[in-house]
Image: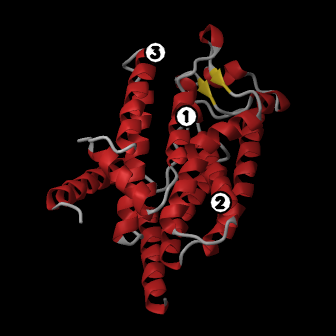
Amino acid sequence: MTPAGSTNELARAYTHCRAIAKREAKNFYYSFVALPAARRNAICAIYAFMRQADDLSDDESLPREERRSKLKAWRTAWSQAAAGASTSDPIFLAVRDALARFAIPLQLLDELVDGVAMDLDRTPGGEADTYATFDDLYRYCYLVASVVGLVCIRIFGFQDKRAEKLAEETGIAFQLTNILRDVREDAERSRVYLPLEDLEAHGVALDSLLRHKAAAPPTEAERALLASIASRAEAYYRSAAQLLPLIDRESRPALWVLVTIYHALLRRIERADYDVFSQRARVPTVQKIAILLAGMARMAWARFTG
């Protein structure tokens, strides 16, 4: 039996993670609400873990080498906690419990941190951080997004092994959407996630993206480049539609909400004719709430007919 003190400590840990998710998860949190409590707690814990790793990697007030050192120390602390060492870190406590509760392989969390660490590997010579081919970018997207999907489906629940590949590809769809949305912000940080082979195929110079003025619309060549990435993302969203019926019935509304919000973001980028420079694409809060309400209705129906 778990000691009462430990039970209270774990409850506080999950409360801490829920607060982080509510504050930071601009798109994810709406889907979390559509989950039953235990699954919602676990998802919030995983999100808080991701957020902590990202924050360590992206803290540009620190030199890259110092960020790398901090991330390494954090990762060591997590490995010790995951192995059963005593920890007071509420995120580690909640994630450790979630991994045990939903049989999530520790390797998936390790891969997630591997992906975050990739952003700290500077291109030789101090040039922009880039990916040569789509295969290279796919590996990055797998580590930072598909792995999250593979964790999530274990919390959602599934029986059919096909769900794993479909979750991987759904993660690719989400990350490609993020990349399109963040082209301008990433370029300002000397990061270009659009594959260099795609830039070359569309006649777009790397320097033109790095120095693109925010107020200037994309050139026709840049629009064609961005449209090609959007087309890839659309293909991967078809995997999300196939994944939905393979997830446990009571979790499907949450996945539906998440996919619907992310796909709506991609469609807003498409409708803006790929002008991701003038302003950052967003799904309005009122639309997210409408999607959430539809998801909650789906959850109520699932419980009623389950």
Whole-percent x and y of residue 249? 53, 79
Residue 30 vertical placement versus 71 (above, below): below
What residue is shown with label 2? 164
Between 22 and 17, the residue placed more toward the observer is 17
Whole-percent x and y of residue 202? 82, 32
Residue 35 vertical placement versus 165 (above, below): below
Which is closer to the viewer, label 3 or label 1? 1
Label 2 sits on a secondary structure element that is: helix
Between 226 and 33, the residue placed more toward the observer is 33
Occupied quadrant, residue 141:
top right
Q: Which mark is residue 65?
A: 3
- Identity, as a three-letter code, of the amino acid under mark 3: Glu
Point out the tag, 3 or 1, that comes first from the N-terminus.
3
- Residue that extends furthest to the top in the rendered view of this protein: 125
- Residue that extends furthest to the bottom in the rendered view of this protein: 305
What residue is shown with label 1? 114
